[in-house]
Image (cartoon, rainbow, N blue to C red):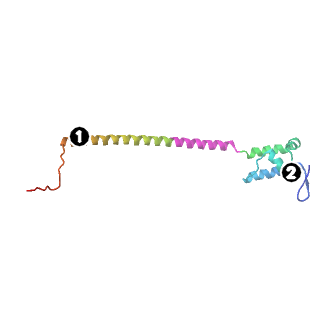
Amino acid sequence: MTKQHPAGVKSTSAQRLREALGTMVQQQGNGASPPALTATALCELAGISRNALYRYHPDVVQTLRAAQQKHRPRPDGNRRAAQRLRQDNAMLREQVARMAALVDHYFAAWQETRLLLQRRDRELAESRRAAKARVVSIAPEHRSN
């Protein structure tokens, strides 16, 4: 199977596969939205069937696998990200524990204040009963003679 290049030069399937693989790897390195480094994508780009790729071009398949390994996300990066998440979780747990302690502190202070106010109200009521308070008018009295 041959394909015409724009300049009129014929290329073999091996050449097209290598060019397509080079293009895909270059796009992976550029950070653009490249197609996935898969045999299917390579074959579509080169205009070759997957059967032909695996049967007649094992060297290209090896090169593709090497490129996949090179551009695969590194597990150590995942480990670092997981470690950062663990550290963040530990920090958040510590903050939650501090906040819970503050809530407990403020709840205890509220209860103590409520009890003090109740005691003050009782003492005031007892003082009023003990004084047997009389209502005294402060308005001048009018006497009629």
Asked whether 140 or 27 is in front, the reply is: 140
Element marked by disc 2: helix
Most extreme residue toward the bottom is 7
Residue at 81% across / 49% down in the picture? 21
Is residue 81 located in the magenta-colored stretch of the structure? Answer: yes
Query: Main structural element of the magenta stretch: helix, strand or loop?
Result: helix
Element marked by disc 1: helix
Which residue matches tag 2? Answer: 16
For badge 1, the amino acid type reads Glu
Is residue 13 located in the magenta-colored stretch of the structure? Answer: no
Q: Position of residue 77 (x, y in %)?
A: 66, 44
Tell me the quarter of the picture where residue 114 sits: top left
Which residue matches tag 1? Answer: 126
Residue 118 falls left or right of residue 2: left
Q: Which residues are magenta?
A: 73-93
For badge 2, the amino acid type reads Arg
Q: Position of residue 33 (x, y in %)?
A: 73, 52
Disc 1 crowd, CA 10 A, few/some/many (<14, 14-19, 20+): few
Asked whether 67 or 126 is in front, the reply is: 126
Q: Position of residue 76 (x, y in %)?
A: 67, 42
Residue at 81% across / 45% down in the picture? 40
> Distance from label 2 to label 1 (Cα)?
103 Å
Tags 2 and 1 touching, CB below 8 Å: no
